[in-house]
Amino acid sequence: MSGFKSTDKYIASRDLEVAVNAAVSLQRPLLVKGEPGTGKTVLAHEVAQSLGMPLIEWHIKSTTKAQQGLYEYDAVSRLRDGQLGDERVRDIGNYIVKGKLWEAFESEQQVLVLIDEIDKADIEFPNDLLLELDRMQFFVYETRKTIAAIHRPIVIITSNNEKELPDAFLRRCFFHYIRFPDRETMEMIVQTHYPDIRKDLAREALNVFFQVREVPGLKKKPATSELLDWLKLLMVEDLPVEALRANEKHVVIPPLHGALLKNEQDVHLFERLAFLARRGG
Amino acid sequence: MFSHLILGLRSAGLPSSITEYLTLMGAMKAGVADYSVEDFYYLARATLVKDERHLDKFDRVFGACFKGLEAPEGVKVQELPEEWLRKLAEKMLSPEEMAKIEAMGGFDALMKRLQELLAEQKSRHQGGSKWIGTAGTSPFGAYGANPEGVRIGQDKSRNRTAVKVWDKREFKDLDDTVELGTRGMKLALRRLRRFARQGAATELDLPDTIRSTAKNAGSLDLKMVPERHNNVKVLMLFDIGGSMDDHVKLTEELFSAVRTEFKHLEYYYFHNCPYERVWKNNRRRHEEVIPTWQVLRTYGPDYKLIIVGDGAMSPYEITMAGGSVEHWNEEAGTVWIDRLKGHYRRAAWLNPTPKQSWGHVRSINMLNDMMEGRMFPLTVNGIDDMTRELSR
């Protein structure tokens, strides 16, 4: 079986590989949870690439409804066309707009569907998709047709844990929780993304990064994606390593902190800590 | 085949079902785990656990079910240099013990027997008196009681085996031991849902469209309305520690029920009576306090406030400045409760102690008076009454 493995762009732990392969071979959805910025969405891209499948992304918003993933009936255009006496109006099928899942079901090739941030949607959203994801088919009321998947797509669902998902939904999925990477893994991740980064810069930056994560009371702890952005900035600015090293004694605001700290309370917190450190030192 | 695993998980309170067990079997059949214990562990985890809170429990049950089944270490053991074993044995054994070994045929005989066993042994073994493994009385293996024991297979060589992975119990932090059976509460809380039309007009308003089209002498005039959303917002304050320890289970059930029911849910902890500070993470309650003022500023009056606490304390903790048992509070509890009540028009207090006993505790009476009688027992009926009161 040609399974999913870490690629040169994405470091996957062994347990993640097993979970992905289980989902692929049993053709059941894989639910991925974890802190924001630990690479949940990127995972789907990497899996699609390594299995050589097209990726269909469905990003969920608070207004998204399950039905929109299947199809929508555009009653408004039909009304308008009806007034204008258009011939198309006689066939309701002309006004059915296909959704992402329909697209995936219809595809001649097996595809990978990413349902991104399912927890953003209304509480009922996952329940509304139960049958569709289980049987990989649905019924179009307007045209009285059943749409069934030609090839069962592989489904990867991500959640940021803002809401709990119903049991009946969970029962049908495989589950993986991406833990925050430890330092060793983080070094590997940095290495794969920026192979030509200076060793000392990477080391110091990681020191600062893990220090920042340790600071109590942060509203949003910086995660992998923030670290990578920040490193990129550091490389572009070509800062001397000393600018980072000064931080070892006291907590001061790391240079270019805009990439790491994402809300003003956190920046204030750091300013306060830096002030106390200066006064204390 | 692994039914004891699933039974163990269920008795530990994990909501794993037959469907998931069958999925696991299917995945095994499809060769996902590939005869590796570690992969099997990962596979079982991905199949049977659906919430990171249960991961720690899973690790414990898995460890208990498959104790002694960790990867056979035969290969590694065979690689041990004979020299090293001999040395170790000499170092560890007393003269009498050495004599006993002599009785068995001397050291070379011991080594030969070891080699025979290694060849014969197919799986890892624990206990018993013949095979190589741990904790047995066989001469070979770790932690043994046999005076001729040779230490094999522990410490370093175990580092890479699967048992290590679940023995680490990395998910301990996420386990909040939420019990099952919160359905009653969830249903009671559901009453708080309030659907309102809000935001951009995205839905076709059919009656209005028909009306305006008719008015327009038949030429189409579309009317849109915003979609309906459940927009109830809930702020919860939990009393924690002290006398609340007796009610931990009930409070957790409530917590897990509200987590599923509301989209806009914020929660903070306090001790005994809300004062000028609350906290979000009980383990770091002294480092990460949040001023109550900040909570009031952040969450507007459209939030519904639910305070959960047994209200059992000394009356001074409510009425006096500096009455708190934990710290010096500048303003009395009454001031803060009035402030919360003034800010949140819809507020209630849930009390996990039985309603009959409230009369005997003075502080509960005081709090109930301050909440204007909106104190409810933490039972399904009590929650039902509370939701009715809050959604009025």
Image (cartoon, coloured by chain):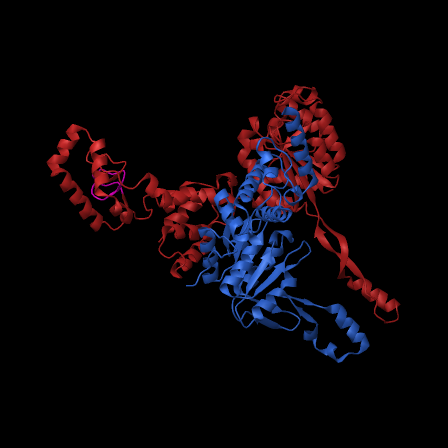
Residue closest to the eye, B143 or B79: B79
Q: Position of residue B204 (x, y in %)?
A: 76, 63
Q: Position of residue B111 (x, y in %)?
A: 17, 42
Image: A253 above or below B364: below
Is the stretch drawn in magenta largely helix, strand or loop?
loop
Decide if residue B107 is on the left or right side of residue B351.
left
Decide if residue B280 is on the left or right side of residue A82.
left
Q: Identify which residue is drawn at 20% across, 38% down.
A: B86
* Image label count: 0
Decide if residue B254 is on the left or right side of residue B64.
right
Residue B372 visible in rendering: no
Reply yes or no: does residue A120 show up in magenta: no
Q: Position of residue B234 (x, y in %)?
A: 68, 41
Residue B287 visible in rendering: yes
Q: Position of residue A96 (x, y in %)?
A: 68, 71
Decide if residue B122 is on the left or right side of residue B242.
left
Q: Which residues are magenta?
A: B126-139
Chain ID, blue in image: A
Q: Looking at the rendering, which quadrant does residue A113 occupy? A: bottom right
Q: Looking at the rendering, which quadrant does residue A241 occupy? A: top right
From this viewpoint, which residue is outermost toward the bottom? A87
Residue closest to the eye, B188 or B96: B96
Residue closest to the eye, B296 or A91: B296
* Chain B rendering hue: red
